[in-house]
Image (spheres, helix red, strand yellow):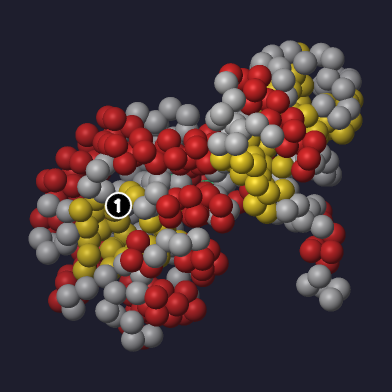
Amino acid sequence: MIGWTAVSGASGRDRLLSEIAERFGTPTYVYDLAAIRRQVRRLQGEFADAALLYAVKANPNGEVLRELARLGVGAESITLGELERVLLAGIPALRALVGGPGQDARLIDRAAELGVAQVSLDSRSQWELWRDRRHETNRFLVRINPQLDPGTHRHLATGAAASKFGMPESEALDLAAELARDGVLAGFHFHVGSQISSLSVYERLAEIVGRVFTARPEADTLDLGGGFAVPDFPLAEFAVIARDLAARSGARLLLEPGRFLVAEAEVLLTKVSHLKPGLVRHVIADAGMADLLRPALYGAQHPVRRLGDPHGGESADLDGPLCENADRLAQGVPLPGDLKRGDVLVVEQAGAYGMAMASNYASSLRPAEVAVDGDEVRLTRRRETTEDLLRLEFP
Ligand code: LLP
C-alpha cells in the first residue's frame, strides 16, 4: 500500500483513501500523522520558548497522542479519562495541565498523585476542593473570564461575560493573593474561545494581562489557551502579540492548541447509501450526526467531495442515516450529478472534534480510525460492533 505523503498529488492521495475505504469499510476517520507533525513544527517555530499543551478534547486518539508525545508536546486534560490517555501515550505528568470547570475528587486525587505540572482553577470552589483533599502543593493557574466577545459561534465564546468559565478579574485576584501567600501561585489562564480568526480580542486582553501581572509580580506563567481558527488563523501575527504579552508580564508562555494541530490532518470517509431526487436532492450517507456532530451542533461547514473528484457538481443535502432533520453532514453543497450508491465521499477538515464527539445515538456504531504515516497504514481503533454496544447492558 502506498503512503499518504509519499504519494504525489491529489490523485495518489485519493488512491490511498480508496484502498483504505475498501479495506476498512466506512465510515472511517483517516489521520495523516505527517500533517500533525507539520502543524506542531509551525507552532514550535513561532514559539521556541513556550510550552505547547495539546487540548486532548480535540482528538483523544491514542496514535495522535503518541505522536505528540514523541514531538515533546504536553497536554491539557479536563477529565480523568483524558489524563489516563495522556499518560498511556507517553506524555509525562510534568508536561500536563489539568483544567476545566468540573474537576472532581477523583480527578483531583489522581492529578495530585501524579504530580501534574499545572492546575488551572476555574473557581474558588475548586480551590477549596483541592485544599480539602490536602493537595495544596501543586502549582496553580487562576482562570480569568475576561468578559470579551471573541467574535465566534456562541457555543465557542468561552471568554464572554455570560459564559461559565473562569472568574471575574477581582475575584481571580483575591484567589491569586491567597495562592501566592501559600507559595503555590503559578500565574493566570485565559482561553477566550474557539475558532478565533480575528486577533482584536488578544489586543483587548492585553490590558487585563498587564493589570493582573502587575498586581501579582510573583506570577511567572501566562496561559493563553487555544482557539486558533482552522483554516485561516494568522499565526505569525498572533505570535508577535502573544510573545509580547509574555515578555511584558515577565512570564513563561503556555498555549493549548487543539483544533489547529489536528483538524486538517484528517478526513472522514463515508459511502452513499441512497439517492433521493426531489424538491431537495438528498444524498443519504452512512455517516451522520452520530459520527460528525459539528454541522448539526454549530452549523459547521466541512468541505465534501466524491473521492477521486475535485469539489463541484449540483446542489445537494448530504444527510445521515438517522431520523431527524439535524442528521446532516452538509446542506446545499455541490456533489456530482452522476453520484451512485456505494460512491465514497470525503468530508474534509474533520480531525478536530470529529471522532471526539461521535456518539452511539440511535445505537450507531462509532467509526473506525486509521492512521497513515509515510508508507504505513495502521488501524488505530477498530469499528465498534453491536457486541461492543450491548456488552454493558446485556452482559
Ligand atoms: N483550552 C481550553 C481551556 C479549552 O476549553 C479548549 C477548547 C482548548 C484549549 C482548545 O481549543 P481549540 O484550539 O481546539 O479551539 N467542540 C467545538 C470546540 C469546543 C472547544 C472547547 N474548548 C467544535 O467542534 O468546534
Q: Is residue 299 visible?
A: no
Which residue sits at x=75%, y=52%?
A: 383
What percent of the width, then of the height, locates residue 328?
Answer: 73, 36
Which residue sits at x=59%, y=25%?
A: 7
Q: Quadrant of the C terminus?
A: bottom right
Q: Is residue 115 visible?
A: yes
Give whichever of 166, 110 is nearer the camera.
110
What percent of the width, then of the height, locates residue 311?
Answer: 66, 17
Give whichever of 392, 62 is nearer the camera.
62
Q: Quadrant of the N terminus?
A: top right
What percent of the width, then of the height, locates residue 224?
Answer: 30, 49
Give whichever of 330, 35 is nearer the camera.
35
Give whichever of 2, 113 is nearer the camera.
2
Q: Tell whether circle 1 marks a residue whose Cβ is less than 8 angstroms from ligand 1.
A: no
Q: Quadrant of residue 6?
A: top right
Q: How many marks?
A: 1
Q: Which residue is mark 1?
A: 51
Name the amino acid, label 1. Ala
Which residue sits at x=82%, y=44%?
A: 322
How many residues crowd around disc 1 within 10 Å: few (fewer than 14), some, or many (20 or more)? Answer: some
Left or right: 168 with respect to 344?
left
Task: Tell me the SS state at disc 1.
Answer: strand
Q: Quadrant of residue 335?
A: top right
Left or right: 383 with respect to 91?
right
Which residue sits at x=12%, y=52%?
A: 250
What percent of the width, then of the height, locates residue 204?
Answer: 25, 39
